[in-house]
Amino acid sequence: MRETLHEPFEIVYKELDECPKSEHQHNFFELVYILDGTGTQIINQHTFRYHPGHMFLLTPEDTHSFDIDTTTRFFFIKFNDFYIKKNAAFLSDPERGVLLRRLEFILQNANHQPGCILKNQTDKSIVKPLVEAVIREYVNRDLYNRDLIRQYVNTILILVARNIAMFLPNRVSEHTEEKALDIVQYIQQHIYDPEKIKAAVISDHFGISQSYLGRYFKKQTNETMQEYIVNCRLKLIETRLLHSEMRINEIAAELSFTDESHLNRFFKKAKGMSLGEFRRKNRRPALA
């Protein structure tokens, strides 16, 4: 089942005892904030125990649902890329404008990250009163309520973008050119298909010679393209080992490795330990 958004953004506030929808997808972004209650978030086969104060990001094409243990008050912000572009155009502060112009890219790169996206504790304490302020305006419908809601939502999005960007590798900065961002996003979109992220294919796709592509990527991102691809694949493997019940052969198939042995050699070369050893040593219940 796929849900569609008919407005640039939408606010939804619900108290639920059970999830009204089975596993489904969106064609838009969605931020989910937990005001009260406990349960489990399920996204792209990953599970995460939620409690009050957690915020989740769902991107287009993510498949997700919730298992609710105790009555939960959910706050949803649903928005599309048109909303991001429209609001960026009206910002006067250059740094703020740059951040929102790149927000879609940053949000897309948050894919495959289970759990709460608010890692900075200070930001976590700021988001709660912002969410409560949006709910007040949404419920009371006072004068200028839509303008205030939009300002609050923009602030929440910027805080979310900061938290995501803080935990991305140092490949993106305020000096990174748009073409480099496009290349990085292309790699992210095709990371499951090794044939599409070969240097020859990428150079042909972007109309850049292979020799220049390598130098350009390194200059813009501070790492070689091969290093970036390897790190992306390692990050996906670690996520599945730590936050899913996927078997090793399933991970190998999903990421287009020849077999379990091939995947294990790749991982051990980078991490110095086998897949099973990494899972045993690092997997813990996600409670925060």
Image (cartoon, rainbow, N blue to C red):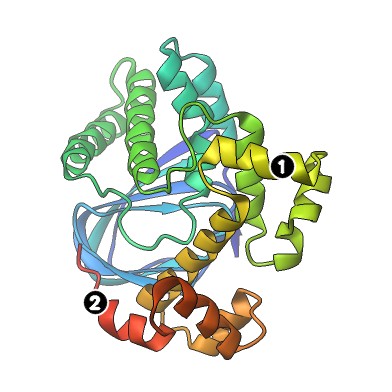
Q: Amino acid at mark 2?
A: Arg
| Mark 1 surroundings within 10 Å by alpha-carbon count, few (fewer than 14), some (14 through 19), many (20 or more) | many
The quarter holding residue 207 reads top right
Check disc 2 and report the residue beneath it. 284
Q: Position of residue 67 (x, y in %)?
A: 34, 73
Q: Quadrant of the C terminus?
A: bottom left
Question: Looking at the image, can residue 79 be seen?
Answer: no
Q: Position of residue 197 (x, y in %)?
A: 71, 58
Q: Is residue 200 above or below residue 88?
A: below
Element type where label 2 sits in the image: loop
Q: Position of residue 146 (x, y in %)?
A: 38, 23
The quarter holding residue 20 reads bottom left
Q: Is residue 129 left or right of residue 158?
A: left
Residue 213: numbered disc = 1
Q: Nearer the viewer, residue 145 or 205?
A: 205
Q: Is residue 67 left or right of residue 125?
A: right
Q: Quadrant of the N terminus?
A: bottom right
Q: Amino acid at mark 1?
A: Leu
Residue at figure coordinates x 74%, y 59% from the top left: 198
Disc count in the image?
A: 2
Residue at figure coordinates x 50%, y 22% from the top left: 87
Which mark is first along the chain, 1 or 2? 1
Residue at figure coordinates x 24%, y 76% from the top left: 284
